[in-house]
């Protein structure tokens, strides 16, 4: 199924996940999973209504965003939250912190994609 927000997609998230491949350290013999990058397309819009913006210690250089995952429409099972990763939003490179995956009370995620909230900081 295709997201109804596909034509409004404006973000690309580069999400690190532990892959299926194993790497062996030649010195110690320890096995570790090889990290892979999963690209996720999203539709994100700035929302200035986050009540957390007025709390002490909040980084005002970060932009609060809300939107939907477009492709894939759900986060892969291997992704763990909270999540911080590289992203491109509206053509600007930076880091994004996905803090919450909101579930719809109407159970519409299968048709609309998972709703997310995040903070984005543009790279200098």
Image: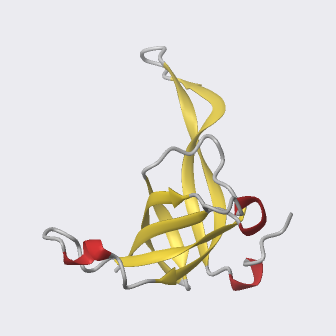
Q: Which is more toward the observer, 49 or 29?
A: 49
Instruction: Determine whether 23 is above or below 123 in the image.
Output: above
Q: Residue furthest right?
A: 1
Query: Which part of the image, by quadrant, shows the N terminus?
Result: bottom right
Question: Would residue 51 be found to the left or right of residue 48 on screen?
Answer: left
Residue drawn at x 63%, y 37% is 19
Residue drawn at x 83%, y 68% is 2
Instruction: Determine whether 67 is above or below 28 in the image.
Output: below
Residue 53 horizontal/vertical position (percent) = 26, 77
In the rendered image, is residue 123 in sight?
A: no
In the rendered image, is residue 105 in sight?
A: yes
Residue drawn at x 61%, y 62% is 104
Query: Which part of the image, by quadrant, shows the C terminus?
Result: bottom left
Q: Which is more toward the observer, 117 or 123?
A: 117
Residue drawn at x 73%, y 69% is 112
Q: Residue furthest front?
A: 106
The image's colour scheme reads secondary structure
Q: Residue furthest left?
A: 56
Residue 65 horizontal/vertical position (percent) = 46, 76
Instruction: Determine whether 1 is above or below 55 in the image.
Output: above
Residue 90 horizontal/vertical position (percent) = 55, 85
Instruction: Determine whether 39 is above or below 77 in the image.
Output: below
Q: How many marks?
A: 0
Question: Would residue 95 be found to the left or right of residue 11 on screen?
Answer: left
Question: Would residue 8 be found to the left or right of residue 123 on screen?
Answer: right
Residue 108 horizontal/vertical position (percent) = 71, 63
């Amino acid at each position: 199924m295709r997201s109804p927000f596909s034509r409004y997609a404006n973000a690309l998230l580069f999400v690190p996940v532990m892959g299926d491949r194993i790497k062996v350290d030649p010195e110690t013999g320890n096995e570790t999973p090889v990290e892979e990058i999963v690209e996720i397309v999203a539709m994100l819009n700035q929302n200035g209504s986050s009540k957390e913006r007025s709390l002490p210690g909040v980084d005002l250089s970060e932009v609060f965003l809300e939107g939907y995952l477009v492709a894939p429409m759900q986060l892969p099972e291997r992704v763990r939250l909270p999540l911080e990763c590289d992203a491109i939003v509206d053509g600007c490179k930076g880091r994004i912190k996905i803090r919450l995956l909101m579930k719809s009370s109407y159970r519409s995620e299968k048709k609309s994609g998972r709703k997310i909230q995040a903070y984005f900081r543009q790279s200098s």
